[in-house]
Amino acid sequence: MVDPTEQPAAHRVVVIGGGFGGLYAAKALGRTAADVTLIDKRNFHLFQPLLYQVATGTLSPADISSPLRGILSDSKNTQVLMDEVIDLDPHQQQIVLQQGESLSYDTLIVATGVSHHYFGNDQWKQTAPGLKTIEDALEMRRRIFVAFEAAEKETDPEQRRAWLTFVVVGGGPTGVELAGAIAELAFKTLKRDFRNIDTNEAQVLLLEGLDRVLPPYPPELSAKAEASLTKLGVTVETKVLVTNIQDNTVTVKRDGQEEYIPARTVLWAAGVKASAMGQVLADRAGAALDRVGRVMVEPDLSLANHPNIFVIGDLANFSHQGERPLPGVAPVAMQEGEYVAKLLKQRWLGNTVTPFVYKDFGSLAVIGQNEAVADLGFVRFDGVLAWLLWIFAHIYFLIEFDNKLIVMLQWGWNYFTRKRGARIITGELMPEEDNAYGVQSSQAPVKV
């Protein structure tokens, strides 16, 4: 017999991933009667759209990161766990954590995102790092600034040219932003800082396999973006495929002919693949995956035959709106997180919710100072106005007020002084970098 004074158990919601999707879901479920647990292997939320500015010395990591516990401190029903989920039992409604502990749930929200995709050439990862994490950004920053330092000491003209050649693979938004930022760094910020090299001799190459940069954007905006990149000093090469990256040389194929580009700094921005949780959901819950491992979801973002498991953000393939799946961008993840929270609240009230519909407020891509492109659907434009809109949009979506203030002040200072204060080289030198500084590879790594 049920004790009428006994309180019913709170609905247990487990959110895996503290990115845009998971964080927005957890925030929207704050102060409800549910028992919410947010799990992430990091203790902070990362504002990924500005990672390239960390990689090029404009911002510091803390400027675009916010502690998850601090963000959710006012949500007394929410617990944050720093851990990694490695397995799932949908029948017992349990997840398994890295150390073997299990955690039960009534509703599971998976938002673990994506990682770099080298299209079967994972050996390129060490030579051509991608940009998804703080560590990635710091590694890129280290390589970019070490290249200038090594060139300053190099006496061989060919070797110096290789150090001053920067190759960005992939002409999507990340590649365009990276190439533009490196060009501004070489041709504006650093031009008076060295004595033995002229940074204007640097080459910044942006390689894209399709016929234009920013392929998801309208062709006229792609053309304007390419023109802006060229004006900054970036060499844009389209219809070229990278076939090998080895021995400080990038091998490309153009019109069936192979070409070789000597380059010490190669940065990867060409593709993504789903996180390991996609395969776990396929193995344990029968989820269907697309060719890059993203999870095919129902119109309400749930898994087929598992209405209490939701997949949101970059890990989800939502193909119920338009001819193509929704893009893996922050606004999609934010809206999906808020939608799932709303759906759960209505379920608990016995109501139903209509399928998810993404409200597209437009796309923005920055090329450089005073240069950006904007597609708002009803109007498309570029230049200073698009750049200002990009700035205000990114300031608005930064999570905490102090981050908004710091980034705004930093951008203002950089705009008027053309200085970048986060140009710090950290980490250990690679063997080829050791040689550039006259250090034998058998010696202990050198920190700078």
Image: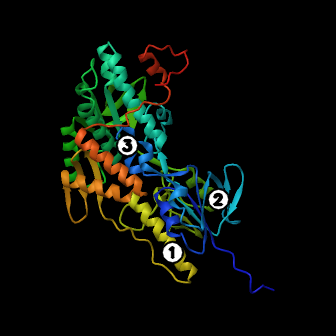
Q: Regarding mark 2 in the picture, which secondary structure is present there? A: helix
Q: From what the image shows, is residue 382 above or below residue 434?
A: below
Give the residue at mark 3: 59
Give the residue at mark 1: 343
Q: Tag count in the figure? A: 3
Instruction: Provide residue 276's location: percent of width, then percent of height.
Output: 57, 50
| Amino acid type of the residue that numbered disc 3 sits on in the rendered structure | Leu
Figure quadrant of residue 132 = top left
Q: From what the image shows, is residue 106 above or below residue 66?
A: below
Whether residue 382 appears in this view of the structure is no
Instruction: Provide residue 355's location: percent of width, then percent of height.
Output: 45, 74
**Horizontal side of residue 296 vs 79, given as left or right:** left
Residue for point 32% across, 51% down: 408
Instruction: Provide residue 256's location: percent of width, then percent of height.
Output: 31, 33
Answer yes or no: do the residues labelled 1 and 3 have beta carbons within 8 Å? Answer: no
Give the residue at mark 2: 284
Residue for point 37% across, 21% down: 150
Question: Dot 1: within a 10 Å radius of its alpha carbon, few (fewer than 14), some, or many (20 or more) residues?
Answer: some
Residue found at the very far right of the displayed protein:
1
